[in-house]
Amino acid sequence: MTLQYARLFQLRAGIQLIAESGPMSKEELTEALRQRKTIGADETATEGADDIIEQLRDANLIKNSEEGYQLTSEEGFNDKGVVLTYSGEEVVGAEDQRAQADRILANIMYQHPMLLVLSKFIYRKGPVKDYEVMREFDGDAFIGDKMNQFTIDMGLDLLEDADVIEPTDNGYIQGRWPVRLFAHVIYEEYSDLIGDGGSVREPELFERLETLYGIPRSTFDNYITRLHTAGIVSEGSYKQLILNEDVLEGAKIHE
């Protein structure tokens, strides 16, 4: 499964078209995407639409049925036993376009965890030029997700679309934290800090992330709450945090 040439706004357009029109055949969806003129300079091209549809399907945001392509539902999606991902219907139900983009990216990050290491590298080392990212990761793989020039370039575009990274004259810098990256970093730092008691004190974990990544306290608290809701972390006595590794396996955020 390869990362497709599809920008975040194009993926959102595909989801919105199905939400507005109901199940659509591939031909209908392709034509509707072409008419949106978001694929490229050639308005008769269908290759871009094919990439958009394939990426949405790979990310479990749409599915093919007898009636045509339709949004995945929360009920059917929950049967997959994964966490920190969303159905197509949940994307449409998000409060605004930014929240929709966050949910789309969460699913793509699940299918393509290379996006985790790309963004983490920029968060730790930024500002970083795109050629520096290429030099660091070209030919590597993370959780089986192979990286090359195309997938790295496409990954950087997606991360920029979602404001996860921000371009500057000196290179990419940290933007808005995605929850899956937060979970990945929490796992790494928790594993490094854990003692004999099988837990880590929350203040110590925050101090580590603040030092390494400059994460704001409000962001840390918000995402710890989201991980708690997902069952990934639980609270112990004396401000201890306990990582539920069985649930974490369903997040696909570490090797």
Image (tube, rainbow, N blue to C red):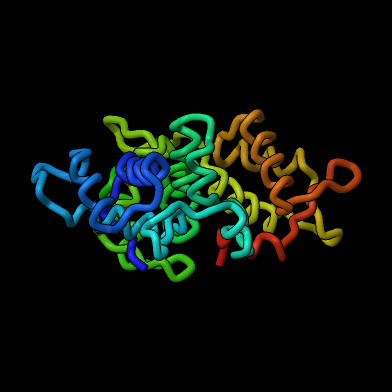
The foreground one among 9 and 69 is 69
Residue 231 visible at all? yes
Q: Quadrant of residue 80?
A: bottom right
Residue 13 falls in image quadrant: top left
In percent of the image, x 56 and y 62: which residue is there? 252
Nearer to me, 110 or 21? 21
Task: Report the side of 73 relative to 130 (left or right).
Answer: right
Is residue 158 something one can see in this rendering?
no
Query: Where is residue 172 shown, x and y percent of the image?
Result: 35, 38
Residue at point 84%, 41% (across, down): 239
* Percent of width and height locating residue 29: 28, 51
Q: How many marks?
A: 0
Q: Quadrant of the C terminus?
A: bottom right
Q: Is residue 46 left or right of residue 89?
A: left
153, above or below 161, in the image: below
| Percent of width and height locating residue 196 | 84, 62
